[in-house]
Structures are given as structure tokens and as C-alpha cells.
Amino acid sequence: MTTILLTGKTGQLGWELQRTLAPLGHVVALDRLQMDLSSPDSIRKAIRDISPDIIVNAAGCTAVDKAESEAGLAMQVNAIAPGVMAEEAKRLNALLVHYSTDYVFDGRKPEPYAEEDEPNPVNTYGMSKLQSERAIAASGCAHLILRASWIYSGRGTNFVLTMLRLARERKELAIVNDQIGSPTWARALAQATAELLGKTRRAKEETGIYHLSATGYTSRYDFAKKIIELARQLSGEQTGWATLRPITSAEYPLPAARPLNAATSKEKIKRVFGIEMPTWQEQLKDCLSDPEARDTFLRIPDKALPPR
């Protein structure tokens, strides 16, 4: 039986991956106590003890602004640790799946970014992820580096949960309208990953970087509008929601700069593996309608849920 080592099991993506990867083999899911990503020795020991056929690295420092003040830790966890995993994967002849980000780009290109476009991160988080990509490639291991975008779920801290909370607490919300990306539900990303790993032999042959996120693009402002629109529909509550006001990124400065255009082309993964994720609108609706998550999102009564 195939042994799959999964890191970051308590995170948004890791939690979903535990379920979606289960049909593919024996999943050994670890958290930070079982594998300390700030310690290369801890990483090597865990991998050598488990001796996996596939390593799926869903762990990392994902707080973009916090990475600016904790750059050392971000580089250790996001850049150095994946490089150690890659070295161990090479030794075992294992496949490494690693999640990167569209934040490796500077956002100045007017069209969606392709995998071969030159990265140029504008913040520490993006730089740490770019360093991880380079370390993995340099190791020579079989790998899939999946650049994701704007991940959200019913767990942890994310844009969707924040919007739903603030939209009920405040009368008006100012949302940036000049940042573009592809909001992606963690479960949909986990399902696409499982589809990829169902083709492990092909994955080893087609090693490299792939953009994998929801189909289509939107601004933070329009994403927020859609979140509240669906929340109204699913909850049946038409009043008591904040109004939204578009602003520029310059009007809402944060510790870490963001690329304005983080849109990525997903043509490569579609061409090579035949994988195309649902649109960001479909993913958002499925997420908010999910019976498992309705208490987290809206506390929607069953009768308000759409037919599935």
C-alpha cells in the first residue's frame, strides 16, 4: 500500500487533505509537534521513520503580514524545510507535493501569469515560497509544486470568515478593489490534489511547477460582494449586512505589500493532467452551502440549504 506523509494536518488545507487522500493509501498526517519544520533534524527523522512513497507538504507560515516581522521563521519553515523534505524525497525516490503561491509574482503583468514567467516577490512570504521552489528543484527529486491562490475554508483565519463576521458587526466595510486573484476553497484544492496523485506515475514523469486554483479571477471587493450575496440567500436574512465601499490598496496599507494582479493561467495543468477546477463562484457557493460548515459560516437551518 502507498504510504503518504502529510504535513500541516491541522491547517485549512491539511485538514481537507486527510480525507481526500485517504482512498489513495495509508495517510500519516503530522502536526508541528510531530514534525518541527524549524528543525531540519526533526524533519529528517520523521521522514526516515515513516519512509513514505509520497510527501504532501501542506504546512507553512501563511500569515503574510506576520512574515514581515518574523522573516527568519518564515524562511526556515517556508523555504528551508521544504528543501530538506526534497532531499529526503530524493533519497527515498518519493514524490514531493508542495504548495506555493501566486505571491511569487510582483503583480505588474496585465495578463494572467504563466508558470514560465519570472517571479519577483514583493513581500517576505512570497520570497520564502520562491526560495522553497528553487530548493526543491535543485534537489533533483520528483516533485509537483502547486501555486495556489487566496485559500479559504470553514476553519482557521481567512478572508471569507472575516467578511462574514465583520459584515454582521459593522454598517460599512472598505474593501480593496485593485487586487486580483482566484479565491480557492481548500476542499476543492484537496480534491484536485487527490486527482493528481491518482496519476502518480505520470506526476513523477511531469515533475515541475503548476498553477492550481479556482477557474476565473476577481477582485477582493467583488469577492466580498459575492460572499455577502450568497450569505443573504442561504440565511434568508436580507437585512443587517454591511454595505461595501471600494478602496485602493494605497488607502489600506499593510505591513506586507500585495501583488495587484495575482491572476495565474491554469492551462498547463489542464493540458498535462486534464485537471480544471470549478469557478471561484461555484466553489464559494459549495463552501457556504456545505452542511459540515454551515454552523461555522452562517448557522443556516437545514431548510435554507439548497438541494445537493
Image (cartoon, rainbow, N blue to C red):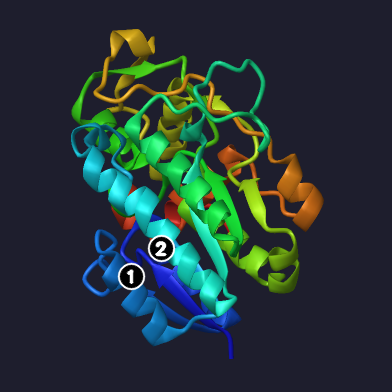
Which of the two labelled residues, at mark 2 and mark 1, occupies the earlier sequence position?
1
Identify the residue at image location x=36%, y=13%. Answer: 249
User: Residue type at mark 2?
Assistant: Val
Q: Is residue 297 above or below residue 95?
A: above
Q: Mark 2 to mark 1: distance in Å?
A: 7 Å
Q: Which of 25 and 86 is in front in this view?
A: 86
- Do tag 2 and tag 1 residues touch (Cβ < 8 Å)? yes
* Residue 66 can be seen in this image: yes
Residue position marked by numbered label 1 in the rendering: 43
Q: Is residue 127 left or right of residue 296?
A: right
Q: Residue furthest bottom?
A: 1
Identify the residue at image location x=58%, y=81%. Answer: 23
Residue position marked by numbered label 2 in the rendering: 84
Tell me the SS state at disc 1.
helix
Identify the residue at image location x=55%, y=16%. Answer: 108
Asked where in the image residue 58 lies, by quadrant, the reply is bottom left
Q: Which residue lies furthest to the right in this view?
A: 271
Q: Where is residue 124 in the image (x, y as percent from the top left)?
A: 33, 33
Of the 4 image quadrants, the one containing the C terminus is bottom right
